Amino acid sequence: MTSARRQLIDANATPFYHVINRCVRRAFLCGEDKLTGRSYEHRRGWIVDKIKALSAIFCIDICAYAVMNNHYHLVLKIDLDKAKSLSQKDIISRWCQITKGHAVATKYMNGDALIDGEMMLLDNLLAEWHERLSSISWFMRCLNEEIARKANREDECKGAFWEGRFKSQALLDEQALLACMMYVDLNPIRAGIADSLQSSDFTSIQERINSLSPQDNAFPSVNTLAQSANKRPQTTHQSLAKFDGSTHLNQQMDIPFHFADYLELIDWTGRAIRLDKKGYIDNQQPKLLNELGIAPDAWLTSAKEFRRQYSGISGRWDSMCEFKKQHNSGKWCKGKVSSQALHP
């Protein structure tokens, strides 16, 4: 039995969430259908373009993404500070980029006088739209509906395109966020369809690296990239959430790590989970594992099995139990014993 969204998504508990959606039909979401020889690669661009467009409208930042053949992963952050700063005109302007809005909102934007009944209606609409602009459920609804319509139109068919509503995981602390982002960014390498971070197409890590690396130097070393990240820590594409540089999670900050440290760890992790890759055994533990007190073996297990280790929430055991208690959920917390080293 599925859980209500209000039991799984609570921006006051944590602003960070991992969301996943999978295609229902044998026809691919992306990739190439080997049976028919038809390519669907262009649909990856649909998804990436749409999540960036929606992020600019919603008060929701993209921390990580990976678009695979029949599913996609996102790590999202609800920006409550941005939501609180929106004026009435901001709310209307943003919402009308998604829907047709309402005649009374158009009248207000044109500067026309509103009668009392229209003002009451407008106030109700503003409250509703304001809430939706920081809602992951509405973000995902807008994303999935458009992709489904375009794919059905292209395939000349009707019916469900997605196997069901999206799955979500609340990321309650910095270790959970780090493990989940790396799990998402390493999807192509773990699946064996890419052999490096730079060749992991349609992932946030590739986009971040490309923003640091000149186009004529397609495969610089991780050390070179890390040095570039240290010199230009905020040059990552503006459509992606920035790295804050702290190691403590709170509501106001962006991603609480230095990007150079994240690069070091993801390169080390990618080599470790690909046993056929030269140099995968490395006795030097990355800086972030030391700072967060994470055991290397537990980290590598999490990088490969994050989705199986946790259900709707991820974090320290006491944090998960408290989250469940606050949301009156009778379900037990799912987390493997091996993950306890990840969350001391």
Image (tube, rainbow, N blue to C red):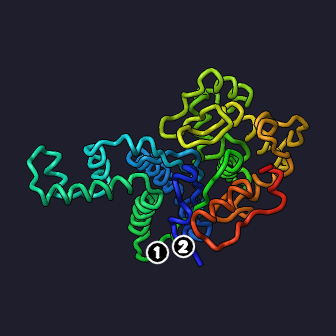
Q: Residue furthest top?
A: 231
Vertical placement of 54 versus 20: above or below? Answer: above
Crowding near the residue tagged with mark 2, few <14, some 14–19, many ≥20 C-alpha atoms within 10 Å: few
* Residue positioned 16% across, 57% down in the render: 103
- Residue type of the residue flagged with mark 2: Glu
Q: How many marks?
A: 2
Query: Element at badge 2?
Result: loop
* Label 1 environment density (alpha carbons within 10 Å; few <14, some 14–19, many ≥20): few
Residue drawn at x 69%, y 47% is: 182
Residue located beneath label 1 in the image: 160
Where does label 2 land, which residue?
163
What amino acid does circle 1 point to?
Ala
Badge 1 element: loop
- Residue placed most toward the observer, 341 or 69: 341
Percent x, y for residue 241?
53, 39
Disc 2 to disc 1, C-alpha distance: 7 Å
